[in-house]
Amino acid sequence: MDVMIVDDCTKIRAMLSALLKNQLTDLKNIYECKSGTEAITCYEKNKPDWTLMDIRMEPLNGFSVSQKILDMNPRAKIMIVTSYDDPEYREKAKQLKVAAYVLKDNLNDVIAILKGLF
């Protein structure tokens, strides 16, 4: 499995990367991106199985990047991983048809979803 982590916070990217390496036996590659622009280029080049996407980033937010990825590949699996438990954000994610919306304080849910337990 290949996973792309998109978050402007270096610590969050490192934490998610370590968690994935520790918990996923079928993990092949992790691609870390610090911006939405970088994520679009990385997705085009590598076509990861999953994308873990933060929302609040500059200059492109996670919703814009998710839309661009889904325009490239409507079957792309994107999981929003955010600190914001906001009904408007959840609704936007639902409208985009992302695969999941997970709060950063529930990172075990990320692993469960990637393992197909949800």
Image (cartoon, rainbow, N blue to C red):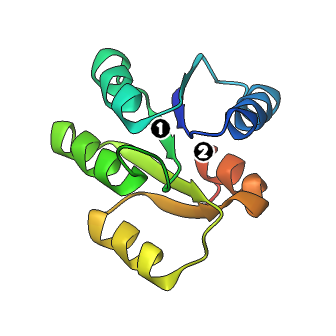
Q: Which element type, helix, strand or loop, lies under badge 1?
A: strand
Q: Amino acid at mark 2?
A: Leu
Residue 27 falls in image quadrant = top right
Instruction: Locate the C terminus by quadrant.
Output: bottom right
Asked if the residues shown at circle 1 and circle 2 are in contact, with their CB atoms under 8 angstroms apart, the answer is: yes
Q: Is residue 60 above or below residue 88?
A: above
Q: Measuring from the top left, give residue 60's x and y in whole percent.
A: 35, 46
Q: Residues within 10 Å of mark 1 (few under 14, many from 20)?
A: some
Q: Measuring from the top left, give residue 85's x and y in whole percent.
A: 61, 76
Q: Amino acid at mark 1?
A: Trp
- Would residue 84 appear left or right of 90 to someone viewing this image? right
Question: Which label sits in the foreground, 1 or 2?
Answer: 1
Q: Is residue 104 above or below residue 90?
A: above
* Nearer-N-terminus badge (1/2): 1
Q: Residue at x 74, y 30 (%)?
A: 14
Name the residue that disc number 1 marks.
Answer: 50
Q: Residue at x 32, y 30 (%)?
A: 40
